[in-house]
Amino acid sequence: MPRGQLILIEGLDRSGKSTQASILASKFSQSKLIKFPDRSTSIGKLINEYLTNKTFQLSDQSAHLLFSANRWELNQEIIDLLNQGYFVILDRYIYSGIAYTLAKHKHTDSNETDTLTNLSNVEWLLSPDKGLPKPDLTMFLTLDMDEISSRKGWGDERYEMVEFQSRVKQCFLDILDERNDPSVKIVDVGSKTIEQVSDLLWHVVESSKVHVLTDKPINHV
């Protein structure tokens, strides 16, 4: 029986991905928008405290595993929705978890702690998410840091700092390789209106043929 397709929008903080994910979901007659982290779950509430309260401390290992656990909380729901013919639109997913943790360690001086915990190793960072559904299409929204940092609300949360977000951007580009993975598309949304970006993303969706039901089995990470 044909299933719906899993479409992921990734991007830096304040890149417009949440707005675009919502618009994209509205273009399908049967869709479900899921935002990660999902702050409504038990684990999600802890993540929300971590992101919004800068005095709340977690080790980087704990934080990385919490974000992964939050994705696993919704694993079965995503699979069931796809099998019921829903198009599931994800606002952030696995790659955000890897890029943000990697950005904290890959571009800093190596030390014994990082070596022992593998926090700069992509395969180790990916391992907690192995088995989750792999998106049929991943679109990474990229634009200049000057444009992002001028947007409303910038700096409200823990990771919204220009230097850090620049590292995150590079880490995303390192792990999302559209040359070797045809399901990955890097989309430049700089200096474009909301309507122009939504039209551009829909063009990518149609070109990738993920706007129709498919007989392909669900792939897994």
Image: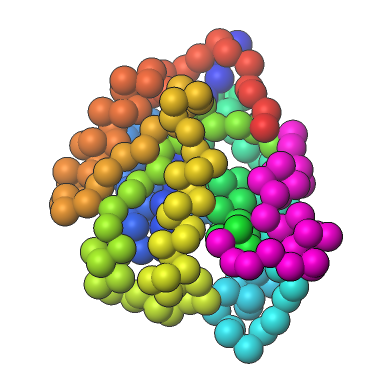
Quadrant in the picture for residue 45: bottom right
Up the image or down, 126 lies above or below 159; here it is: above
The x, y position of residue 217, in whole percent, is 63, 16
The x, y position of residue 185, in whole percent, is 39, 33
Query: Looking at this view, is 74 or 12 the one in front?
Result: 12
- Residue 104, can we see it? no
Name the residue: 31% across, 63% down. Answer: 145
Query: Looking at this view, is 215 or 142 the one in front?
Result: 142
Furthest toward the right, the residue is 116
Image-based side of 35 in relation to 117, left or right: left
Q: Range of the magenta residues?
A: 107-131
Q: Is residue 99 magenta?
A: no
Name the residue: 35% across, 28% down. Answer: 205
Name the residue: 74% across, 37% down. Answer: 130
The x, y position of residue 63, in whole percent, is 70, 66
Query: Looking at this view, is 102 or 129 the one in front?
Result: 102
Name the residue: 59% across, 66% down. Answer: 108
Number of marks present in the image shown = 0
- Residue 12, can we see it? yes
Quarter holding the C terminus is top right
